[in-house]
Every structure is written in structure tokens, then in C-alpha cells.
Image (cartoon, helix red, strand yellow):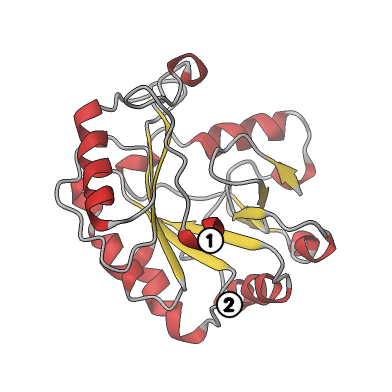
Amino acid sequence: MSNTKIEWTDSTWNPLTGCTKISPGCKNCYAERMAKRLRLMGQKNYVNGFELTLHEDTLNKPLAWNRPKLIFVNSMSDIFHENVPISYTKKIFRVMREANWHTFQVLTKRSEILCKYNDVLEWPDNVWMGVSVENEDYKFRISHLVRSDARIKFLSLEPLIGPVGHLDLTGIDWVIVGGESGPGARPMKEEWVMEIKEQCHRAGVPFFFKQWGGFNKKRNGRMLQGRTWDELPLQLTA
């Protein structure tokens, strides 16, 4: 299990690595940069760099982790990538179902494929499903998410590279917002963030502000209106 600096999870699990860009939010992909670095370091799971690669040997790892964790699934890929066989996706879901003491957070930009596979996947209660939305043009992913049978549904508005306008938060249990970080990071405006936060609070949806981002994300921090916002789904706070 990999510990992580991602503020909204405890650990990561990558039964596949590598991806391809499909929308503007992918432009400065942190996972791509990291994969290239790990390849140069000789990490065996990254001999293919950022080419899509399945790792059968990592599938059962969560079953050996005894302490309950929030686990981000595929921080380095997307299990709904069009080149991932549905048979392999089912294996991932089987492990998540069996490791029912953990909570698994799955995130995708490929919401159409999520819809396509929804009816052939078994959705255990410990699997949270989310979609990434980087600006108003990609809000259609939210309607796809809401149609899924996941018990907990969340939005990752990161990297937020433009306003999202009105959000229909019906059926959404959690919203994360964050700015882009690293080389070439595109700026995020405070008014975009505040518009989202206010909509979340009106709808009673927990709001999590991850970071301002920028080239030096640590220096820019994650304070909004003089405080941090670390709200979580009610399932965790009850």
C-alpha cells in the first residue's frame, strides 16, 4: 500500500498504471510526470512509463492490509479507460467488495464508459464513485455519475481551470475542489471556488478544498476564507 500526500485520502492502490489525455484537465497530468520519474528510478511497475499497463500482481494487495483505510484507486490511471478489459475491471471490483473494511475512492474522466459498464458491475457500499470536472464544458460527466449505482457519489473539480456555473448536486454526496499544481500550472480564481462552495452549502453537500495549486503548491497552501475546509461525506462523519 502506498501512503500519499493527497489530502482527501489515506493511501493509493494502482492495479493499473498509465493513461491517455482526453480533455483540457489532462494537459499537465501529475501522474504522467510521476510515471516518467519512477521509470528513470527503475521502479518495475513503470518500465512502460505512462503507457497503459495492467498489474495483476497488485490486485489482491488490499486484502492483506488489516487496518481500515480510505484508498484512492488508480491515482496513476483510470479503471474506466477504454483499453481496460471489463473482465479486469470486474476483478478490481471483486477485490474491493471482499476488502469490505476499507473504503475505496474511484475517480474517472471517462463517464460514458462508467455508464456503459454500470449494469455489469456489482457496487458494494464501500466503493465511492467520482468524476473529474475541470470546467463548465465537462459537467455532462456529473449526469453520467448520478445514473450509476454507487452508493456514495462525489465530484473532483480539479484541476479547476475555469468556472463551472450552476451545479445540479442532486444525488451528489461530496465535492472536492483544487487548483492545478506543478510546471505550467494554470491559475484558479477565488470566485470560481466560492461559487462552488456556496452551492454545496445551500445543497447540504460536504465541501473539501484541497489546494490553491500553482508551481509551489505548498507555499500557496489550502486556506480559503482564513480556514481549511475538510468536510467529508456523512458516512464518515456519522
Nearer mark to the viewer, of 2 and 1: 1
With respect to residue 83, does 41 lie above or below? above
Residue 200 visible in the displayed image: yes
Looking at the image, the residue that sits furthest to the front is: 238
Kindly indicate whether the residue at mark 1 contacts the one at mark 2 (C-beta within 8 angstroms). Answer: no
Q: SS class of the residue under badge 2? A: loop
Quadrant of residue 66 in the image? bottom right
Residue 81 visible in the displayed image: no
With respect to residue 33, does 122 lie above or below? below
**Left-right relation of 89 to 68:** left
Q: Residue at x 29, y 62 (%)?
A: 142
Percent coordinates x, y for residue 84 in the rendering: 55, 67
| Distance from the alpha carbon under mark 2 to that under mark 1 | 19 Å
Q: Type of residue at label 2?
A: Pro
Q: Type of residue at label 1?
A: Ala
**Left-right relation of 94 to 173:** right
Q: Nearer the viewer, residue 56 or 61?
A: 61
Mark positioned earlier in the residue sequence (2 or 1): 2
Q: Residue at x 53, y 55 (%)?
A: 237
Find residue 54 and name its label.
none
Percent coordinates x, y for residue 206 in the rendering: 38, 51
Rate crowding at label 1 as few (under 14), some (14 to 19) or many (20 or more) other CA atoms within 10 Å.
Answer: few
Q: Residue at x 72, y 76 (%)?
A: 98
**Left-right relation of 92 to 223:** right
Rate crowding at label 2 as few (under 14), some (14 to 19) or many (20 or more) other CA atoms within 10 Å.
Answer: some
Q: SS class of the residue under badge 1? A: loop
Q: Residue at x 70, y 33 (%)?
A: 38
Label 2 belongs to which residue?
A: 124
Label 1 belongs to which residue?
A: 238
Percent coordinates x, y for residue 132 in the rendering: 37, 51
Q: Nearer the viewer, residue 81 or 120?
A: 120
